[in-house]
Image (cartoon, grey):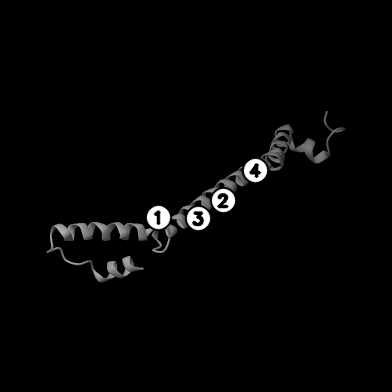
Amino acid sequence: MFANVFPGWMVKASLIALIGWIAQTYVQLVLLSVIMVGQNVQSEASDARATKTFEDTERIVQLLRVDTDHGLQAILDGLRTIHSALAKVDPDIPPLPPTCAQAVSH
């Protein structure tokens, strides 16, 4: 029946083997491209997360620098102001530690 359409080794292997071979070929050729597209989408999402993490880290480092606006310098200035106000109310308040005084004076 299939001798004229398919090669002899396919006819002898039976119709089930032929269907299995076609299904395997379909999975390899068609669905492999779907997997590759999914990997590309995951890669782009991973790159976006990495970029966001890098930007967040840069922002944190900027906020922690003493010499930047709205960074640690602003916090230290606020602490110095609070310390000065408290020292006027209670003269027994100890002075600022040297590390704070040095950082604030910059």
Q: Badge 2 local density, few (<14 within 10 Å), some, or many (20+)?
A: few
Q: Which of marks 3 and 1 is in front?
A: 1
Q: Which of marks 2 and 4 is in front?
A: 2
Q: Which of marks 4 and 1 is in front?
A: 1
Residue at image mark 3? 54
Q: Nearer the viewer, mark 2 or mark 1?
A: 1
Residue at image mark 2? 47
Front position in the image: 59 or 9: 59
Front position in the image: 45 or 18: 45
**What residue do we see at 74% from left, 38% from top?**
13
80 relative to 4 in the view: left or right: left
Q: Where is residue 106 in the image (x, y as percent from the top left)?
A: 36, 68
Report how far apart the C-alphas of labels 2 and 4 lie in the structure: 15 Å
- Mark closer to the chain start, 4 or 1: 4
**Could you tell me the amino acid type at mark 3?**
Phe
Report how far apart the C-alphas of labels 3 and 4 lie in the structure: 26 Å
Location of residue 30 with respect to 85 vertically, above or below: above
**What residue do we see at 83% from left, 39% from top?**
8
In the rendered picture of this protein, how many numbered marks are placed on residues?
Answer: 4
Location of residue 105 with respect to 28 vertically, above or below: below
Report how far apart the C-alphas of labels 3 and 1 lie in the structure: 20 Å
- Mark closer to the chain start, 2 or 4: 4
**Could you tell me the amino acid type at mark 4?**
Val
Q: Badge 3 local density, few (<14 within 10 Å), some, or many (20+)?
A: few
Residue at image mark 4? 37
Q: Position of residue 57 (x, y in %)?
A: 46, 56
- Mark closer to the chain start, 3 or 2: 2
Image quarter of residue 16: top right
Residue at image mark 1? 70
